[in-house]
Amino acid sequence: MEVTCPHQCGHTRQPTQGARPRDMTDASRGKIHLAGLDFVRVLAAFGVVVMHSNFGLRAPMTHAAEIFSNAFVFAVPFFLAASLYFRAERGTQPVGDLCDRLKRLMVPYFVWSIIYLAAHGAKLLLIGQEGEFSRFVSAIPGHLLCGSAAVQLYFLPLLAVGTVVLFFISLWLSRWPVSGIVGGLVIAMVVSAVMESNPSVSPPGPVWRTTINNFVIWTGRTLPMAVAALLVARLFSKERLATLPKWTMAIMVFGVVLPQVWGLSSLPPSFWDIGIGFGWFFIGCVASQWLPHTAGLKSLGNAAGGIFLLHHLVVEVMQTAIEKGLPGWAEITSLPMLLTISLTAFFTSYLIVNQASKYPSIGRFLIL
């Protein structure tokens, strides 16, 4: 079969033996799209729903439910690794591009923080807890500055800090050889361990102290991940990721996934973040060689960011209904119960996000 030249000059050539499989590329645009990363992105979004479904029930889990929940702790490291890799892969960007990216992260952060705070305040008033409502109102500035308006929203300022760290790291390390970047990664891991264990002294006042300590912790957490993203981008272009050897999957499953599920790893946090984040990133890349591009997978992948932001509202509504209508059912979190709530909340969130994304004025707050 002949292949037309991508420059549209009419020239044809025979495909080479090592050509990428059709499923992994968007042939109409000549761009590589890794369907496996869409799949892992959807899996990670569902995993966040699973973990937060259990948090809200405040009930002990059965052993099976605990193992199932532990299987998804890769979600935030994966989202962080994938986002930083694709920025690093683009090379050093101008300051204007960095500002645009920060705006795309922080505007939705404040919008969703206000939504969650308003919902929580309304709930307190509806159940008649005026005293608790007064304390809640006084704590609003702290929630906004510390990423605690909802359990998942801290990820947006975390990613914003990581994006800034990557920008400055790229200015310094982008021209270094691979050996120099590896050395930088080792140094970053040591610095990260020090920063996480010894947060800086901050001004008096609980809000500012927490805010600055959080910034120090977020910087320490994202520093090694940013250097790792720069290293992976140097070693693996998107074209190379599309043709990774299939045995890479086995290494990642036995070296990353199984220890994660069974809680066998005792690595420091910075090592663990890089391991499970990029481990699942490579799993998604290899899986792209088998997974076809489908409209459903693409739609779910596009909605993953919105599901991540919205799901907690849906979960809280469901959990409140369970506690009021079926109080005995929430005494222990079994695996069937966890699956029922998680799947319902996930697909409800997806349907809302999918419809809301059709309106540009709303959709821009749902895409990360």
Image (cartoon, rainbow, N blue to C red):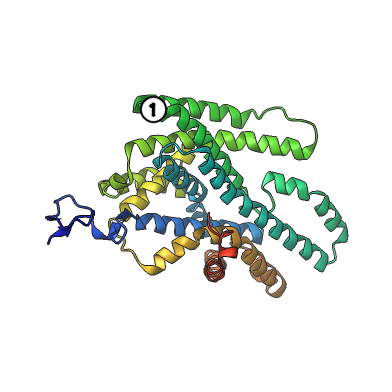
Q: Position of residue 100 (x, y in %)?
A: 55, 47
The residue drawn where x is 74% and y is 61% is: 118
Q: From the image, which quarter does the N terminus lie in?
A: bottom left
Q: Foreground residue, 6 or 167? A: 6
Where, by quadrant of the figure, is residue 142 drawn? top right
Q: Quadrant of residue 330?
A: bottom right
Q: How crowded is the residue under tag 1: few (<14 C-alpha within 10 Å), some, or many (20+)? A: few
Callout count: 1
Compared across the picture, whether 254 is left or right of 305 comes to left
Question: In x, y percent, where is residue 226?
Answer: 48, 36
The amino acid on which the numbered mark 1 sits, given as a three-letter code, is Arg
Residue at 44% from the left image edge and 66% from the top image edge: 299
Taking 26 as reference, is 85 above or below it? above
Residue 42 screen position, x and y as percent: 46, 59
Asked if one can make out residue 63 in the rendered structure from this viewpoint, the answer is: no
In the rendered image, the residue lying farthest to the right is: 131
* Image point (45%, 50%), residue name: 261
Q: Secondary structure at mark 1?
A: loop
Relative vertical location of residue 107 with respect to residue 294 in this rendering, above or below: above
Q: Is residue 50 above or below residue 81?
A: below
Q: Position of residue 53 (x, y in %)?
A: 60, 61
Left or right of residue 360, residue 40 in this image = left
Tell me the residue that label 1 is attached to.
Answer: 175
Q: Residue at x 61, y 45 (%)?
A: 157
Residue 360 in which image quadrant: bottom right
Whether residue 161 is visible to the viewer of this picture, yes or no, is yes
Q: Nearer the viewer, residue 124 or 363?
A: 363
